[in-house]
Amino acid sequence: MINLILLGLPGAGKGTASERIVDKYHIAHISTGDMFREAMANETPVGLEAKSYIDKGNLVPDEVTAKLVEERLQQPDTEKGFILDGFPRTTVQAELLEGITKRLNKPLTNVIAIDVDEDVLIKRLSARYMCKNCGATYNKISNPTKVEGTCDRCGGHEFYQREDDKPEVVKNRLEVNEKMNTPLRDFYEKKGILATVDGEQKPEEVFAAIDKILSKD
Ligand code: ADP
Ligand code: AMP
């Protein structure tokens, strides 16, 4: 059983690593960012509330986000395990998550932080693009599709850039997330559950480092 948190600043490679982890372990990938983007596209009450925060690169309130995660963790596809990608992002969320995992009897097995320097993150975020059909993530510079204009995963031909990856928003997003990053890592470090990997290696090397940690248990 793998119940994993992937920690890392925006652009660290959490989504990219998650795609590979899901391919190997077939566990549920829970990205709060993806869930909010879906909610915004469907104009649900949560989506409408989240939009005002996300558009500016700020964090959605802790209680709103935690409630979404608690509901998601009750779906049957999490029974074999899950990856939390982008949650928790604050120590308040980490504390709320403790309550959730206790209530649902789904204890965490791993917390892995992906480390990448800020200057690399800025470059990565501005070159990130996604497949419109399946959501797979690519990078114009560091991680393009194998065949130009065709998604490796689903063969789709349409791509988009996230609104919040545009330069005006990226700076604030990184600042907001950086403020929370150290206390969050300390929270899990103190519990003795934190492992770290170097996120500046190639995507396959980042995955190999994560996989080594996951297959130890
Ligand atoms: P996160 O989910 O942590 O925000 P992503 O997985 O979306 O990060 O990755 C951010 C960008 O960096 C994407 O464009 C992705 O293709 C690229 N990327 C991810 N991992 C690596 C890596 N190890 N080396 C270089 N580029 C990477
Ligand atoms: P991400 O796709 O993880 O980069 O998230 C995109 C945006 O969604 C963030 O900039 C936040 O506004 C919001 N968001 C995602 N996860 C969380 C979270 N755990 N807490 C608060 N806001 C979040």
Image: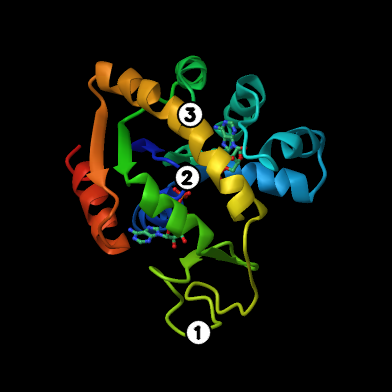
Mark 1 secondary-structure assignment: loop
Sort mark 1 into few (<14), some (14-19) or many (20+) by Cα contacts within 10 Å.
few
At label 1, which amino acid type do we have? Glu
Asked whether mark 2 and ligand 2 are closer than 8 Å, the reply comes as yes
Residue 155 placement: quadrant: bottom right
Question: Which residue is nearer to you in this view: 31 or 107?
Answer: 31
* Closer to viewer: mark 1 or mark 2: 2
- 142 in relation to 58, above or below: below
* Closer to viewer: mark 2 or mark 3: 2
Q: Earlier in the sequence, mark 2 or mark 3?
A: 2
- Distance between mark 2 and mark 3 Cα atoms: 13 Å
> Residue tagged by mark 3?
88
At horizontal 42% and vertical 81% (from top left) the residue drawn is 146
Left or right for 95, reference 111: right
- Distance between mark 1 and mark 3 Cα atoms: 35 Å
> Residue tagged by mark 1?
148
At label 2, which amino acid type do we have? Pro
Asked whether mark 1 and ligand 1 are closer than 8 Å, the reply comes as no
Left or right for 81, reference 49: left
Quadrant holding the C terminus: top left
